[in-house]
Amino acid sequence: MTDFAATRRLFQIPDDVVYLDGNSLGPLPRATPDRLARTLDEEWAQQLIRAWNTSDWIGQPARLGDRIGRLLNAPIGHVVVGDTLSIKVHQALAAALEASSRRIILTDHGNFPSDVYVAEGLAATLGRGHEVRRVAPDGIEAALDDEVAVLLLTHVDYRTGRMHDMAALTRRAHEVGALCVWDLAHSAGAVPVDLLAADVDFAVGCTYKYLNGGPGAPAFLYAAPRRAASVTPAIPGWLGHAAPFAFEASYRPARGVERFRIGTPAVLQMAALEASLDIWDEVDIHRVHEESVRLAEKLIAGLELRCGRELTLASPRDAMQRGSHVSFHHPEGYAVVQACIEHGVIGDFRTPDILRFGIAPLYIGDPQIERAIDVVAQVLEERLWDDERYRVRRVVT
């Protein structure tokens, strides 16, 4: 059984801070500095270029992919790590479109904007009449018809935490002959995901949120066994070649998901991610989710009791229909969040009026939730947010 008291000691968080923003950037695992130092001092400094072989830097993308895949019930050898999430969305969506003669990319209004940017850009680049069609989140199933080539969805809505039924929507998409690309940015390390049982075609995600890989940590891509072996990647990179160091004049795709590799692995970023995955290797994602639900229910109940006249729940009431962050509406949401941050409770703001609080049980427990309730209530009751300095928008919100 996962010991959350023990996992909380594995993260470095200031004593005077309640950190409820791990859904944007996870905190620093205490083991990460030593892991990075070892990469620098023992591998790069001593082994130099030999470390690609002696420390298996070249194998990091596949090795880390399998460790992430365990949290997603993905088959061994079908998740690869590298690049950024937008690049992985581009690769997965291009691969799915290649497999279809249809022209509609179906998504919802709650999808993360950059995923839609990628879809629109890819449609324009292909120049074959593809169209991005957006519908309400609860209208996806009805909109799936024989015109749809690809269903492109973020599993957990980045603003409200609303969670799609991945298995049901994937099944319906396949019934009408469409493929699926799922963005797991707010799912991996937050909620149980079963890519194999849901029969997902492609999935992508990032590792700097709940997986605590650090700022700039690499993304990952999953390709189902039936898809990975037949795709010609839209970005045929050097390390996605079947024999990179043969330096052949023409591209031959590597086996399976390895063909989605592009360039040189970001070794330092992957070393940091390795340190975090050492924690995840010992964690049961189902227990994480159970504890997340319990703590979220406590936060919702406390804030509604203390602040119910000012805050309106933006997340689904049913815990089984939301991920691991809880959101509330407030007309002065940005100023409220900034005041909370100054008083030691770090959440974040999403337009137009959403206060967002991430619940990550690996380092958040009852004392943190109780303090968060007290601080938010104080900020609202005493109108501490009503100060011009809290209204000044920073670049990152």
Image (spheres, rainbow, N blue to C red):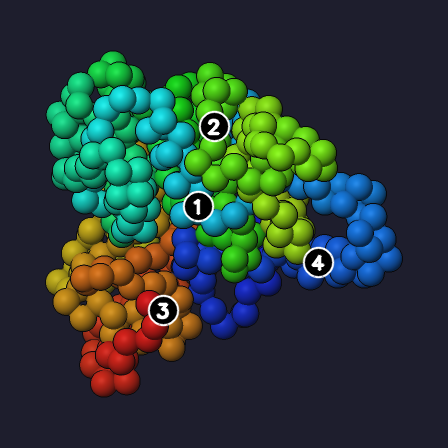
What amino acid is labelled 3 in the image?
A: Val
In the structure shown, which secondary structural element does the residue marked by tag 4 occupy? helix
What amino acid is labelled 1 in the image?
A: Ile
Residue under pointer 3: 396
Looking at the image, is mark 4 or mark 2 earlier in the sequence?
Answer: 4
What amino acid is labelled 2 in the image?
A: Thr
* Front: mark 1 or 4: 1
User: In the image, residue 153 lies at what x, y percent?
Assistant: 29, 37
Q: Nearer the viewer, residue 374 or 265?
A: 265
Seen at 29% across and 35% down, the residue is 152
Q: Is residue 355 above or below residue 315?
A: below
* Front: mark 1 or 2: 2
In the structure shown, which secondary structural element does the residue marked by tag 2 occupy? loop
Q: Is residue 128 left or right of residue 223?
A: left
**How many residues crowd around disc 3 within 10 Å: few (fewer than 14), some, or many (20 or more)?**
few
**How many residues crowd around disc 2 within 10 Å: few (fewer than 14), some, or many (20 or more)?**
some
Q: Nearer the viewer, residue 154 or 124?
A: 124
Residue under pointer 4: 36
Give the residue at the far right of this rendering. Answer: 46
Looking at the image, is mark 1 or mark 4 earlier in the sequence?
Answer: 4
User: In the image, residue 262 lies at what x, y percent?
Assistant: 55, 42
Q: Give the label on residue 232, or none.
A: 2
Residue under pointer 1: 87
Q: Measure the alpha-carbon separation of dots 1 and 2.
A: 15 Å
Give the residue at the far front of this rendering. Answer: 249
User: In the image, residue 233 lies at what x, y percent?
Assistant: 47, 32
